[in-house]
Amino acid sequence: MHYGKKGFTLVEMIIVMAMFMLVIMAASSSFNVLLTQMTKLTKTEESNIEGVVGLEMLRHDLQQVGFGLPDAYMEAAPPAYGEASIDPADDYNDAPSGLPRAVVAGNDLLAGAEVADAVDGVTYELLAGTDYLALKGTTLGMNETAQKWTYLPFDSGITGLKKPRIWTEAYLNLVKDDRVVVVKKTVVKSRIVNQMIYEPTTPDTYWATFDPVGLAPVFAPTLPEEVYYIYGIGGKDNNTGLSMPFNRSDYFVARPDVSDRMPLYCAPNTGILYKARVTHNETASTGYASGALQPMPLLDCVADMQLVFGWDLTDGMGNQGRDGLIDTWSTPEGVTVAAAGATPPATQAQVQTALANSDPDILLRDSLKVVKVYLLAQVGRRDGNYTFVGSDEAGQPQRIFVGNPLDGFVAHRYDLTAVQRNYRWKVYQLAVRPKNLESNQ
């Protein structure tokens, strides 16, 4: 027996274990703090990435508005077409025979407005006080055909069917039975006029079924200086043809009436930013009939969307603008106007006339320079340890200015509720010059 050797005493073991537990507790606390911070950072970055993706889709559509739209009809009766068939989307129609406006919008929607999805049965309640944006152009369709175009040059040696230009890259070409519209570009008094081509005796058949072999003679130039442009709208799944001579996408903020469609982490009184395609007659292929809306979510937890339009309508000497400078900011319906610089702004009547596209001298396409979109969206999730203490540009506490003071204060101030103050918020800003409008060419 070796009585000279001994182990640890009970007291020593207890002390070591206590020290070890303290180290574990400290490490666990640090890990929890780190995990919490990483979770917040991850959710914040998810919100930012989602916002960027959604806004890029909106930016693309804004840049493309007006592409392929006619701004004149033939001298015979104008065509009759359909557009959105449900409220409030039908408030922004130009149907049945109006010249389509590239941009139409609503300001500060009233409570109770709803959009219904005819296929999945979901109803979307639009957030009161938000704006509504309807964009029109041939390339706004969510199909390959809508991204294609070609042209028909004059050729006096061809009789019967007129063959369109075929591109070298096959993927760029329209294919047989695609639904298209044909537009003639002419210059009238130094202005380019896009006139829709159709058979004058049957104006309601304003669209054509594409065939690479050739189109009917009515869709062919008759003079050497003429070129007819062919714009794809939809594929052959548009069962009975086109409902309208363009494609249309609407943007709005709404809450779906189905609980699993709205993220549980969103703050109260928020909704989802949707892009809704106004459909042609596609019942057989998609289930959507003519004029229905097909919503697609873009950005979650949005509290407000505000629009500001920038105009070139005056030159400071009482004349219409066209000097290339933005002189007026306005709300979407032209109710409020403000100066964009030293030049006095256009009047409310001038802006509303341009919005209505009713005066050939101040058509919307000649005067609208820029569209600004402001989105107030939640960043991350609720944080009980955080309370919003900011203020708007005027120093009003618990209020966020959804806009830019440089716009002449035509945007909106959003008052946060007590519950919403435990969330972080960000105002996404988007300013786009539609490149297919005459004012930006």
Image (spheres, rainbow, N blue to C red):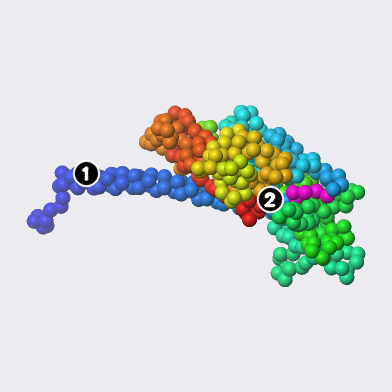
Magenta stretch encompasses residue 261: no
Choose top left, top right, bottom left or bottom right for residue 4: bottom left
- Total marks shown come to 2
- The answer for how far apart the CA atoms under marks 2 and 1 are is 74 Å
Dominant secondary structure (helix, strand or loop) of the stretch shown in magenta: loop
Judged by depth in the image, the label closer to the viewer, 2 or 1, is: 2
Residue drawn 79% across the image and 60% down it: 228
Helix, strand or loop status at disc 2: loop
* Residue that sits furthest to the left in the current view: 4
Q: Quadrant of the C terminus?
A: bottom right
Give amino acid for label 1: Ala
- Disc 2: which residue: 66
Residue drawn 88% across the image and 52% down it: 199
Residue drawn 72% across the image and 60% down it: 148
Q: Is residue 150 above or below residue 113?
A: below
- Does residue 253 appear in this view? no
- Tell me which label, 2 or 1, sits earlier in the chain: 1
Tell me residue 372's x, y (percent).
56, 44
Lateral position of residue 215 relative to residue 29, left or right: right
- Does residue 15 appear in this view? yes
Q: Observer-nearest residue: 313 or 61?
A: 313
Q: Observer-nearest residue: 167 or 286?
A: 167
Tell me residue 403's x, y (percent).
50, 40
- Disc 1: which residue: 18
Tell me residue 159's x, y (percent).
90, 66
Lateral position of residue 278 relative to residue 387, left or right: right
Q: Which residues are magenta?
A: 70-74
Magenta stretch encompasses residue 73: yes
**What label does residue 184 carry, if any?**
none
